[in-house]
Image (spheres, helix red, strand yellow):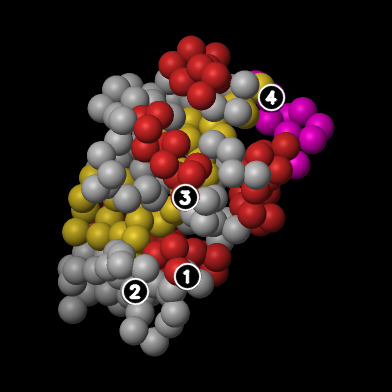
Amino acid sequence: MAVVHQSKSGAVDATIDALRRGATVVVPTDTVYGLAALPTNDAAIAAIYELKGRPDTMPLPVLGASFEQVTALGLEVTDDATALAERWWPGPLTLVCGFSPLAEAPKWLEGRDELAVRVPDHPFLLQVMRHTGVILVTSANPHGSPTPTTADEVAKVLGARVELIIDGGELHGEPSTLVNVRHTPSIIEREGAIGAEAINDLVAKGGGAP
């Protein structure tokens, strides 16, 4: 296991290389440290579930570098989704979207009827994803436990089971707010860094209201 600070020369390339080789990597985000893998690597994804003890009935969220990158996954982009993304992406907002019957989703999404997606406000991670494409990311902690706030704490919890940890300093961000835009009106499934009042106010004013 290697711990590399995000400011170190070559840190971005090392992260890209590790992900492409099928490694499980810990990356900093704008909220908390996350376990990351490419969505096309079944072994890396299985490692994340094993590391966390996460139930395999809980799909992993997707992070992308831009609105265009995540919506290219065949998602149905509702008026609410557009309004919310324009206001809070990049940022701590996760949208649960359905799939458009007019678009083709990648094979790794076969059998899914919805997908949780986010564009994080984190320059290092955005740079990585511009090269790798979207990645699967979930908090770097055992399922149901608090997420470590530093790279050293992550290393103590996950140990040698992770090949690379990117040190992004001390992270105390709140989890992202989770909004399901498959419904009309949209439903807040988890209130986090963005308050429910702000979400509901924007949706009421936007084109997503019936």
Residue 65 visible at all: yes
- Label 2 and label 3: CA atoms lie apart by 22 Å
For badge 3, the amino acid type reads: Asp
Tag 3 residue: 42
Q: Residue at x 30, y 36 (%)?
A: 54
Q: Are marks 4 and 1 in contact (CB under 8 Å)?
A: no
Point out the frontmost of discs 3 and 4: 3
- Residue 198 colored magenta? no
Tag 3 or tag 2, which sits nearer the N-term?
A: 3
For badge 1, the amino acid type reads: Pro
- Label 2 and label 1: CA atoms lie apart by 11 Å
Q: Are marks 2 and 3 in contact (CB under 8 Å)?
A: no
Tag 4 or tag 2, which sits nearer the N-term?
A: 4
Q: Give the percent coordinates (x, y) of residue 159.
A: 51, 17
Tag 1 or tag 3, which sits nearer the N-term?
A: 3
- Residue 4 colored magenta? yes
Between 95 and 201, the residue placed more toward the observer is 95
Tag 4 residue: 4
- Label 2 and label 4: CA atoms lie apart by 37 Å
- Specify the quadrant that holds the N terminus: top right
Label disc, if present, on residue 106 of the rendered structure = 1
Point out the frontmost of discs 3 and 1: 3
Tag 2 residue: 99
- Label 3 and label 1: CA atoms lie apart by 14 Å
Q: Residue at x 65, y 48 (%)?
A: 20
Indicate the quadrant where residue 78 lies: bottom left
Residue span colored magenta: 3-13
